[in-house]
Structure formats: C-alpha cells, structure tokens
Amino acid sequence: MNLINTFFNIPVFLNSLPQLLWGLVVTIQIGITSILCGLVGGLFLAVARLYAPSAFTLLIRVYIDIFRSIPLLVLLIVVYYALPFVGIRLSPFLSAVTALSLVSAAYTAEIFRAGIEAVPHGQFEASAALGLSNRNTMVDIILPQAIRIVIPPLTNNCINVMKDTALASVVAMPDLLKQATQAQALNANPTPLIGAALIYIALLWPMVAVVTRLERHFNRGKR
Amino acid sequence: MEKTTSPLISIRGLTKAYGTFTVLHGIDLDVAEGEVVCVIGPSGSGKSTLIRCINHLEAFQPDSSITVDGIRVAPGPALAKVRAEVGMVFQSFNLFPHMTVLRNVMIAPIRVRKTPEADAERKARELLARVGISEQAEKFPGQLSGGQQQRVAIARALAMEPRVLLFDEPTSALDPEMVGEVLDVMRKLAGTGVTMVIVTHEMGFARQVADRVIFMDGGRLVESGKPSDIFDNPKEARTRGFLRAVLNH
Ligand SMILES: Nc1ncnc2c1ncn2[C@@H]1O[C@H](COP(=O)(O)OP(=O)(O)O)[C@@H](O)[C@H]1O
Ligand SMILES: [Mg+2]
C-alpha cells in the first residue's frame, strides 16, 4: 500500500499529467525536427560522398567519424555552454536539435551508404550505359532499391534520436523528462517520473515493434 | 557492308591498364555504320574491356582515342551524348528490378530524351512486341525467365534509338534452351541495319550474322576478317588454336 502510494500515486499523477503532456509535446517536437534534419543531412552526405571530389569525400568521412565518436551529452553541453564564448548563442531547443541532428546525420549517412553499396554495381552500369544523369540514376534507380535495405536501420536510428531527446533536459529544455523531475520536486513524490517513463515506453514501443516486423519482412524477401 | 564514308566508331591506340597490368595494348579498330562486328577470343583476352571503353564504362589511357559519330569519348558533357547514342546489353541483363518491364523500357527516353510519357509508352510497347514479350509488359523482371529478361534488356537499349548496340556475351548467363530466342532477336536486329559490336562465344551465330569477325588474345587484336576467312582460313596460329579448342569442345 505504501509502495503504491509512493510510486503510483493516482492524485499526484493526475495532477502532474498536463505538465507531462506538455513535456511530451516538446519531446516530440525536438525528436521529429532532429530526425528530419538528420535524414536530409545524412542523405546529402551519403550521396556527396559518392560523387564529390576526393578532398570533400575525406572531409565527409572525418565528419561522420567525429560525430559518431563524440558522446551526445558532451556535444550538447559544448553547443549550449561553450559556443556562447564565440558568440554563438542557441536557445535550449536549437541546441538540442543541433546536437541531435549533427549526430543523427552522421549515423544516417552511414546507413544510406551501406544501402547504396548494397545495390549491385550492374545497376549503376546499366544506368550509365543508358545515358542517365547522376541525379536520375540516384533518384530513379539506386535510391528506390536502397530504401528497402535502409528502412529498418533508419527506424532504429529514429528510436535512438527520440530516446536521446531526454538529454535536452540538461540544457533546461522543458521536455518530458524535465517536466517530470520538476513535478516530482513539486509534489515530493516520484510518481511523475514513473509516469514519464511509461509515456516514453508507450511512445517508442510501437516503433520498436515496427522495426522488428520490418526486419523480419525484409529478411524473408531475401533469396 | 563496308562503306567509304568515315567510320561510326573509330578506335586508335586504345590502351587500358589496371595498375601495372596492361589489359589492352594499343587497339586500332574502325566500325562502319550498319556493320555487325563479332568479337571472339579466350576468356580474359580483353573483349569486355574493349567494348566497355566505347561507352566509357571503363576509363582508358588518355593518349588513346575513341570517337563515336565524330564525338570524342571522354569524361565531360559530351559523354552523355555518346551514351545516348550507344546502347549496351550486358551478360547479366541488369534490368531495374523495382520497375515493371514496361517502365524499364520507358525510363531512359523519358529522362534522357525528354520523350513525353505517352509516346515513350507507345514506343516501349512496340519494342516489347518486336522482341516477343508484349504480354509481360506489366510484370517485374524477377518474374521473367532469363531469355525473356535479356530480350527486355535489348528492348530497353533500343528504346533510346541508339546508333550503335554493344553486346557483352548476351547469352552466356542463359540456360541453353533460352539462347536461341535471344540470338533470334539479335539476328533480326542485324537485318535492320543497326550497327552492332557483339562479344560472343556463339561461333555459329557469329559466322552467320557478322560482317566481320575479330579475334582477340592477350589484349591484342590478333586477326580480323570476314567470317568465312576467320573460321575457314585463319592466318594466325593463335586463332587456329582458339577455334580448334572451341569448335571441338
Ligand atoms: N577491375 C579489374 N581489375 C583488375 N583486372 C581486371 C579488372 N577487370 C578485368 N580485369 C582483367 O582484365 C583482363 C581482361 O578482362 P576482360 O575484358 O573481362 O576479358 P574478356 O571479356 O575477354 O573475358 C583479364 O585478365 C581480367 O582479369
Ligand atoms: Mg568478358
């Protein structure tokens, strides 16, 4: 009884629910913005890596490796607390989106590269022999075939980005986790934290299930 | 068929190396408009490399020169023009698996020649009828037999109305019972006056269809002549050896 009153206190939960839902909205905003920026950036990097002059390709490779190595929390703190010293002052929202997008773009670029490389070389040759431009080759021939391969890892990456939005709470972003910790302090009861955890699970479980199904589906499609 | 006008394909001193390994040693070759040339020779002799240089799927040494219809084959904007004029059929078909057969044939004219969809579709259906697979137009390549896929690949190349068609062992990946249907299509094509350069191991076909047969060995053009000369009276010992090996096989 005591345990339930402590961790699953219904009045406290209902009391903090509006606050948690506002936090959820912020979390989703950060997540979706970062996912979209990461997708666009990653696709650009992957295609540029194929066609750009070798100096650029090297730069892109360095970018990808750096942003896959740096801990996201460190990057976020650098963006929010260090950049102001050189005059770049980003809001908590922009800091979070910038850090998440930079990292997501690096992972997404690797995912797209793997997808493009999995398309048989003969497809590039047939496109070239027909006189298709690089752009048409990518858009009409290669990417539609790569997309099957990249959808499960891309969805996985989306899940990771959504999870990592919780780090935004350290730069005072009123996201789901931040709202929950504030409500906990206000009510002197941890129920809001449990509530937030459940909301994260409710948000991400369907995506996890989708990935599992997609992976099974695409593996069955393989000969 | 030999004409006195300037050749459609002109290859001069074509040299190609992978690192220190030279694959083509200064090949000279002219192909006249409307000519059907069959390239024969042992595996690894550079036949594929030779025809893949013509549309610059392979880069070659810069002091070599290839021109197609007067256009120099080299990286740059003119290359798109050359490739639009030169169709290619691969040993492994290389159809686009995510598009229907019809779409496979339509896509290049639409994108490269800016042909309107409706015209491209009419043309594509015509070509599919010509290679005998109209009923398969709405299917995907994976649903077709090898022979049918290769005939689609020929239709896809023809859709660009190329001046030249290059074939790289178009029947080598096929089950034996499907070789005939593809050779039949190619035989009909040869009769329409389109210029063809065909790498093949089908000696009967080469003898029957070629205006000229070229024998390659070790990255060199060893002997070239009318089919009857090459097959019945080869001058070079290496040609004789090769023919003896394949014909007695
Ligand atoms: N990408 C490559 N790298 C190195 N060597 C190659 C490559 N492609 C072909 N070769 C070599 O070039 C030679 C000619 O190959 P190819 O033109 O395919 O011969 P063919 O078509 O007559 O069988 C062969 O010895 C082959 O091993
Ligand atoms: Mg070959």
Image (cartoon, coloured by chain):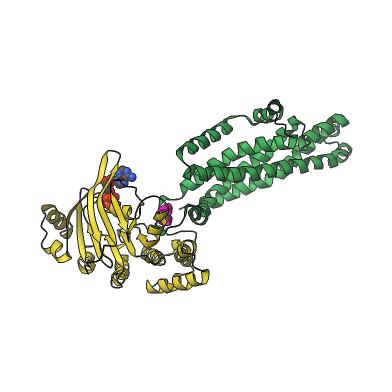
Chain colours: A green, B yellow
Q: Mark yes or no: residue A59 visible.
A: yes
Task: Identify whether B72 is placed above or below A27.
Answer: below
Residue A90 sits in quarter: top right
- The image position of residue A15, as x and y in percent, is 88, 39
Q: Nearer the viewer, residue B123 or B67?
A: B67
Query: What secondary structure prevails in the magenta region?
Result: helix
Q: Is residue A177 left or right of residue B64?
A: right
Q: Which residues are magenta?
A: A122-127
Q: Residue at x 79, y 39 (%)?
A: A23
Q: Quadrant of the C terminus of chain B?
A: bottom left
- The image position of residue A214, as x and y in percent, is 58, 50
Task: Identify whether A200 is placed above or below B125.
Answer: above
Q: Is residue A39 left or right of residue B102?
A: right
Residue B197 sits in quarter: bottom left
Q: Mark yes or no: residue A3 visible.
A: no
Q: Is residue A92 magenta?
A: no
- The image position of residue B122, as x and y in percent, is 47, 73
Residue A208 sits in quarter: top right
- The image position of residue A116, as x and y in percent, is 49, 47
Q: Quadrant of the N terminus of chain B?
A: bottom left
Q: Is residue B18 left or right of residue B230?
A: right
